[in-house]
Image (spheres, grey):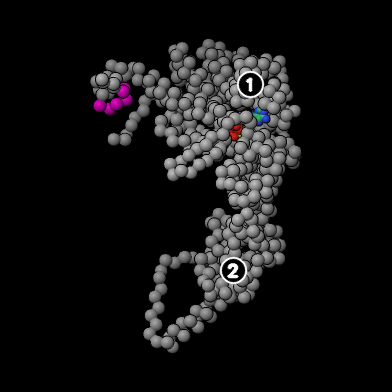
Amino acid sequence: MTAPSAGGDATTSKAVTYKDKSKPTDVRTSNINAAKAVCDAIRTSLGPRGMDKMIQTANGEVTITNDGATILKQMNVIHPAAKMLVELSRAQDVEAGDGTTSVVVIAGALLDAAEKLLQRGIHPTAISESFQRAAALAVDILTKISMPIEITNRELLIKCASTSLNSKVVSQHSSLLGPLAVEAVLTIVEPGHEQACNLSDIKVIKQLGGTVEDTELIEGIVFPQKSANVSGPKRIEKAKIVLHLSPKTDMDHNVVISDYAAMDRVLKEERTYILNIVQKSILRDAVSDLALHFLDKIKCMVIKDIEREDVEFAAVPIASLDHFVAENLVTADLVEEVGVGGGRMVKVTGAQSAGRTVTLLVRGSNKLVLEEADRSLHDALCVIRCLVRKRALIAGGGAPEIEPPSRNTLEGIDAICTRAYANALEIIPFTLAENAGLNPIQTVTELRNRHAKGETSAGINVRKGAITDILEENVIQPLLVSTFALTFATETVRSILKIDDIINTIT
Ligand SMILES: Nc1ncnc2c1ncn2[C@@H]1O[C@H](COP(=O)(O)OP(=O)(O)OP(=O)(O)O)[C@@H](O)[C@H]1O
Ligand SMILES: [Mg+2]
């Protein structure tokens, strides 16, 4: 039995040149179908009643997550168009942090709409351009219905963080994690430089042991290792800290000792040399046992192997002993080695130079929960960052996606494509209803009616299983998350539509 030859095969392409006209359509359909398959795979994870995924990697590691970007990153996607959706989710994760499932679900629905428009004989370029205009229109509408927020309004910020946490595996801890995320971001925001708000100023440390409830925020820095001392101090108040970055040399030194007198001399010299250094500073990699012994004696705590990214948090780094002067010393109210979970770590609080450094110490009873708590906290931190950058929020629960775009000014193909675009966005309320066990068609129809009557905050109340004013349920989300999702999804769909051939350079 012979299988029909594939159109894209290099060896057979010459023989089937007459089919060339249908090739762009075939390639487009294949791309759309591959991308839609990815969307279908993660659709069930959307919303507070969405399901979680258990992902097993080739080396046997297991991850349980609800985060769209994480699911897609771990999926073994082969088709190039499907890979574009993985990238789409990653882009949303970088820019907005939240909405990584929604963005892919929206892209899937837009591709489905585009496929139907293509079948009606509309040219891909026309669809692509109309979609871009429709996206701009939708962003305008969302901006119009958004509400301003003051970043001093902690209560509202906490509600936003909780909305994003509510759809996670660790949702039952949202009342603890939400306020922590808000506090952490507000500590690092410098008034007047809100746009520069950088989440890498928040150090997140994961420590097994305890439960997620034990997660705490420390106004200072925590080093996840114990001090290197043997019998040195474990707690220093009003500590002076110096950070020594010793340049590493890869040279080996050989000292040839020919008699006992010489050996004596070498030992004596080493002793005075080390003593001299110890009196002045702490060495990063070069803390020998002898040096530690002296450091213990002079009651100096040593923390070795500091991560590169912690260097700027910790103190003023000095590279040579010449810079070991008073102004390079940082004072901290308290440096203490404490036992957390199964390990020990050093907490530095009240450091005068650390400025706006905070540490989130995430706890969890097992690795799976701990990792997911960390990912969920990241989403909540990103949500607050979005609100700091653009102080506007909108109602959630499918409300923004159903808001009808004004189509009056459009006509012809543009009107058809814009309508198709608007209808495609209804996938979000549809899926939210479906995942919550409601009748999706009935729910979406009612939601549409309520919005047509001007109730812009009517949304799907998954708790009551009905359409209610979703603002009363405190389901609110940043405007930026939704507008990024729309813009990014549209961009990806447009690029997929414009591809008419896949050229394989792999031989
Ligand atoms: N309590 C709620 N009631 C109704 N809808 C909600 C509620 N909480 C969240 N939602 C909606 O759920 C959607 C978000 O779901 P979810 O957090 O699972 O996905 P995501 O934010 O797109 O992706 P991810 O969080 O994985 O990055 C949003 O449309 C939001 O409006
Ligand atoms: Mg979310």
Q: What are the residue bounds of the magenta stretch?
A: 6-11
Rendering quarter of residue 59: top left
The residue lying toward the viewer, choosing from 414 and 383, is 383
Q: Secondary structure at mark 1?
A: loop
| Percent coordinates x, y for residue 106 in the rendering | 55, 26
The picture quadrant for ligand 1 comes to: top right
Give the residue pinned by disc 1.
Answer: 438
Q: Secondary structure at mark 2?
A: loop
Location of the N terminus (image quadrant):
top left
Q: Are marks 1 and 2 in contact (CB under 8 Å)?
A: no
10 in magenta: yes
Please, what is the three-letter code of the amino acid marked with disc 1? Leu
Give me the residue at 31% from left, 22% from top.
7
Determine whether 153 is above or below 103 in the image. below
In space, the residues marked 1 and 2 are separated at their CA atoms by 61 Å
Determine whether 457 is above or below 365 in the image. above
Instruction: Tell me if I can see residue 280 in this picture.
Output: no
